[in-house]
Image: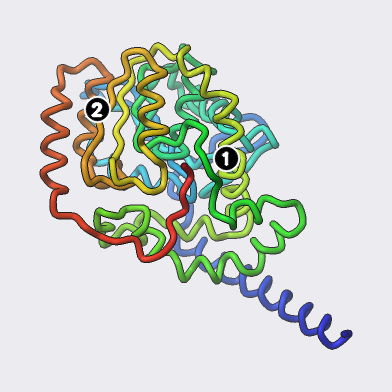
């Protein structure tokens, strides 16, 4: 028995040491690329692009989803709007290079408040808020908590409503007080490294993953112990939060467009996106055939048109959607594993 305990202790120590070394290697590969903004006792990492003289759009604030960081939104959108708008890409609290802050950031409304303070620090009084996946819950919370700062909303495959069933097992495990930190500091990173490519494929399916997606968006950052646990807490708390807050979505009056795919196996469109379209008066739902969970990367031009529509441009979203669907007609990538479903 003593031999077994000693062997187990040595194994755990070795895994902790390996995880720390590997986490530092990941950080060296993907260092901060923006600035640290003090939001009241802790800092958020953000890339801020100042308003250009040629701007024809309001400020744009991009909020990434679960298991991500600001690079995931920076990759598809920065080049599309440079010269047209002031932009703020933010690592959500506890993700990427942002500090976690207090327990208020265990829920979307706390994170929305942190983003509002970051905007104010950068002199952004009002913006169109663009949220992907979990970022959609934060965008909705932002509109509820800060309507005077919300010029419009664009939801991309949003996770916003309670759903039947649960979440992937490792989210619940990692959220627990004792076993969670142990798992995050020992097994999560080595197991996660084997799943980065296949996990990305599942998120994009049935659409192909861009060849440079993993290297440019750094999903490995979420495998660091603290980030992994923060991400798990976010996802584990989402259903209860959405159950409590979704009935208030009818209070949102800002111009809204929702883009989602009928082949999204991560966040089911008929629950979340259709729910938002039902709850927010005047919201326009754009449902794309054969689109998975990444309209930000797969149908970027359609997302651009949606942002323009919310900003007041005369945009034919039906025509843009038809063009997007035509481009996806031949996509048939299969998820090579279990997708981390949230609804």
Q: Secondary structure at mark 2?
A: helix
- Residue 50 visible here: no
Which residue in the structure is indicated by mark 1?
93
> How far separated are the C-alphas under marks 1 and 2?
27 Å
Which numbered tag is attached to residue 9?
none
Residue 182 position by quadrant: bottom right
Q: How is the image coloured?
A: rainbow
Is 273 in front, or is 82?
Answer: 273
Residue 196 position by quadrant: bottom left
Vertical arrangement, residue 77 with respect to residue 187, above or below: above
Looking at the picture, how far across and down is residue 244, in whole percent? 60, 25
- Residue farthest to the front, as pictured: 164
Looking at the picture, how far across and down is residue 337, in whole percent? 41, 64
Q: Earlier in the sequence, mark 1 or mark 2?
A: 1
Q: Residue at x 27, y 18 (%)?
A: 311
Residue 202 position by quadrant: bottom left
Q: Secondary structure at mark 1?
A: loop
Which residue in the structure is indicated by mark 2?
306
Is 168 in front, or is 93?
Answer: 168
Looking at the picture, how far across and down is residue 143, in whole percent? 47, 19
Q: Are marks 1 and 2 in contact (CB under 8 Å)?
A: no
Is 326 in front, or is 20?
Answer: 326
């Amino acid at each position: 028995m003593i031999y077994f305990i000693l062997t187990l202790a040595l194994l755990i120590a070795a895994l902790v040491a390996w995880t720390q070394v590997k986490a530092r290697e990941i950080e060296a590969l993907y260092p901060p690329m923006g600035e640290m903004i003090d939001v009241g006792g802790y800092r958020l990492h953000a890339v801020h692009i100042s308003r250009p003289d040629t701007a024809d759009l309001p400020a744009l604030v991009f909020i990434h989803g679960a298991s991500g960081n600001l690079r995931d939104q920076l990759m598809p959108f920065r080049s599309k709007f440079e010269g047209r708008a002031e932009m703020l890409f933010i690592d959500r609290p506890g993700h990427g290079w942002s500090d976690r802050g207090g327990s208020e950031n265990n829920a979307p409304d706390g994170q929305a408040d942190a983003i509002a303070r970051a905007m104010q620090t950068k002199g952004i009084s009002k913006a169109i808020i663009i949220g992907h996946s979990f970022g959609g819950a934060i965008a909705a919370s932002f509109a509820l908590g800060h309507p005077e700062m919300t010029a419009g909303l664009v939801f991309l495959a949003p996770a916003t409503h309670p759903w039947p069933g649960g979440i992937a097992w490792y989210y619940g495990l990692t959220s627990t007080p004792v076993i969670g930190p142990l798992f995050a500091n020992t097994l999560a990173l080595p197991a996660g490294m084997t799943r980065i490519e296949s996990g990305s494929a599942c998120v994009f399916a049935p659409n192909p993953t861009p060849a440079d997606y993993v290297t440019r968006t750094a999903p490995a950052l979420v495998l660091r112990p603290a980030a992994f646990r923060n991400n798990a807490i976010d996802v584990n708390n989402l259903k209860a939060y959405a159950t409590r807050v979704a009935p208030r979505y009818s209070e949102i009056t800002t111009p809204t467009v929702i883009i989602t795919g009928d082949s999204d196996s991560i966040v089911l469109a008929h629950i979340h996106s259709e729910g938002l379209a039902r709850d927010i008066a005047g919201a326009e739902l754009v449902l794309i055939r054969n689109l998975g969970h990444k309209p930000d990367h797969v149908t970027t031009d359609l997302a651009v048109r949606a942002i323009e529509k919310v900003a007041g441009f005369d945009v034919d979203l039906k025509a843009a959607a038809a063009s997007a669907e035509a481009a996806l007609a031949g996509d048939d990538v299969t998820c090579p594993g279990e997708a981390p479903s949230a609804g």
